[in-house]
Amino acid sequence: MNVLDENIPRSQRELLRGWRIPIRQIGYDIGRRGMKDDEIISFLHQLRRPTFFTRDPGFYERRLCHVRYCLAYLAVDKYETALFVRRLLRHREFDTEAKRMGAVIRVSHAGLSVWPLHAEQEAHLEWTD
């Protein structure tokens, strides 16, 4: 399940849906508006294998790695988020839920910075498209 934080603009949510990427957004389709970061983490534990996309840099922390979800911090302009969600979901290292689970990912124009589950070091990947 792909979950967008409420800080992702509606236009970007609609663009993703137009591309037939299944997503749900906190405060609109799932959860409630105004959820705090710790509430979101608890909420993700209740969902089946979610990948959570946010523009909040506080979610890019190694300590947040967990086998039951993936966190993707989008370090791009708010009107580029849909494009970078799609790019991440198509990246050969993260193109399935199984490949994403446990990872905390920073998505940017330069590429991907990743904290894999149980890793001692951050990994850096380039875009493949």
Image: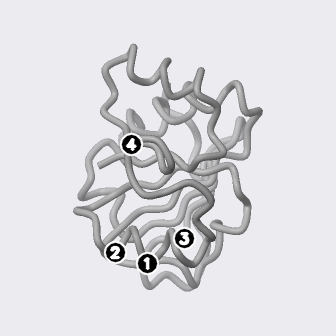
Three-letter amino acid code of the residue under disc 1: Ser
- Asked whether disc 1 touches disc 2, contact meaning CB atoms under 8 Å apart, the reply is yes
Three-letter amino acid code of the residue under disc 4: Asp
Residue at the spot of label 2: 45
For marks 2 and 4, give the CA distance.
17 Å
Residue at the spot of label 1: 42
Q: Residues within 10 Å of mark 1 (few under 14, many from 20)?
A: few
Query: Helix, strand, or loop for circle 4?
Result: loop
For marks 1 and 4, give the CA distance.
17 Å
For marks 1 and 2, give the CA distance.
5 Å
Nearer mark to the viewer, of 4 and 3: 4
Nearer mark to the viewer, of 1 and 4: 4
**Percent x, y of residue 129:** 49, 24
**Percent x, y of residue 25:** 46, 43
Residue at the spot of label 4: 29
Mark found first going from the N terminus, 3 or 1: 1
Question: Does residue 16 appear left or right of residue 36 in this picture?
Answer: left
**Percent x, y of residue 48:** 22, 62
Residue at the spot of label 3: 115
Mark found first going from the N terminus, 3 or 2: 2
